[in-house]
């Protein structure tokens, strides 16, 4: 890992996909001129996260991915695309891509845990539209070792732990918590995953659009391995920037050696006395 700057563009998507993509590109371009090395977009950044409409914006030929690859190559930046609704045959996946400064996809991740919940004032069944992903991976680039998750995945500690065990130094998480789960769990969950895995975590949410049925929590943020929030947005459209310092990761892991003290010999064993 080397020192680098990350920018999260918390855009506010409406119901015009083309306009949403143009606005996201505008935010990315402005951030690119602020000396950042890696840029990031939210979950389904180009449309409100309303499942009944998601089929309308899902892509089979990767048109939006092509646009983002061309942008990364033009500005010579690393880019986490946020997530896109991608068709593969009859199935739709919620997929994020990590693109290098040459415009090449060097990491692809599809959401593995689907948000099927029945909460007061909110009922969501992602599995009715989205198909589960099946693998998680890490890529090593000139900045750091990078892993990706998407939204609901962050609630499952095993996912972040697997990325850490594979060498991840920073985990990028396009996400769209809502106004019920967000105030309750957004900060504590992302900070907990950073602390227990002693890595940086960056979470990118859409800004809140009060005209849509699904209202995103916002509050995109970057957390360091000690659990400190380095930068955070509110609910409105905003670009936030944080500097990622390798010495923080190194100092945290050496002074508080959680990874070294793990007991793989006992994890997963059943208590036969129960």
Image (cartoon, rainbow, N blue to C red):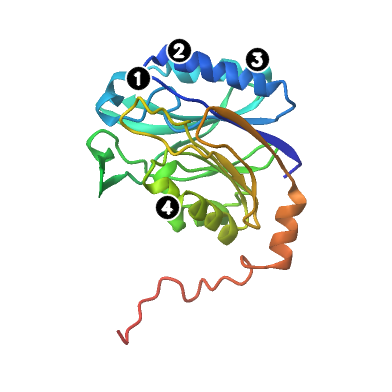
The x and y percentages for residue 260 are 64, 68
| Residue at left offset 39%, top offset 17% | 61
Q: Which one is in front in this view, the residue at disc 1 or the one at disc 2? A: 2
In this picture, is 35 found above or below 124? above
Give how far across and how far down residue 274 sits, in percent.
30, 84
The CA distance from mark 1 to mark 2 is 20 Å
Q: Residues within 10 Å of mark 3 (few under 14, many from 20)?
A: few
At 68% from the left and 22% from the top, the residue drawn is 32
**Under tag 3, what secondary structure?**
helix
Query: Taking 94 as reference, is 36 left or right?
Result: right
First in sequence: mark 4 vs mark 3? 3
Give the mark toward the camera: 4 or 1.
4
- Give the spatial CA distance, label 3 vs label 1: 24 Å
Q: Which residue is mark 3?
A: 74
Residue under pointer 2:
19
Q: Nearer the viewer, residue 225 or 180?
A: 180
Q: How crowded is the residue under tag 2: few (<14 C-alpha within 10 Å), some, or many (20+)?
A: some
User: In this rendering, which labeled residue sits more in front, label 3 or label 2?
Assistant: 2
Give x and y (percent) for residue 155. 42, 53
């Amino acid at each position: 890992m080397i020192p680098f700057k990350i920018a999260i563009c918390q855009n506010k998507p409406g119901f015009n996909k083309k306009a949403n993509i143009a606005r996201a590109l505008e935010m990315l371009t402005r951030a690119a001129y602020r000396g950042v090395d890696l840029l990031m977009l939210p979950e389904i950044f180009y449309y409100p996260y309303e499942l009944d409409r998601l089929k309308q914006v899902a892509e089979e030929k990767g048109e939006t991915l092509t646009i983002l690859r061309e942008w990364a190559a033009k500005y010579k930046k690393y880019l986490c695309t946020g997530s896109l609704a991608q068709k593969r045959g009859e199935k739709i996946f919620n997929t994020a891509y990590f693109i290098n400064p040459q415009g090449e996809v060097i990491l692809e991740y599809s959401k593995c845990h689907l948000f099927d919940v029945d909460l007061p004032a909110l009922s969501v069944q992602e599995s009715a539209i989205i198909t589960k992903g099946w693998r998680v991976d890490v890529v090593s680039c000139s900045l750091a070792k990078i892993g990706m998750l998407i939204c609901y995945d962050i609630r499952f500690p095993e996912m972040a732990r697997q990325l850490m065990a594979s060498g991840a130094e920073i985990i990028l998480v396009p996400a769209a918590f809502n106004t019920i789960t967000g105030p309750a769990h957004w900060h504590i969950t992302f900070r907990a995953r950073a602390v227990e895995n002693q890595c940086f975590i960056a979470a990118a949410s859409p800004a809140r659009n009060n005209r849509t049925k699904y209202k995103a929590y916002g509050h995109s943020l970057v957390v360091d391995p000690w659990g400190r929030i380095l930068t955070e947005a509110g609910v409105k459209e905003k670009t936030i920037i944080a500097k990622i310092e390798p010495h923080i990761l190194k100092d945290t892991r050496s002074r508080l050696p959680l990874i070294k003290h793990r007991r793989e010999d006992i994890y997963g064993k059943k208590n036969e006395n129960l």
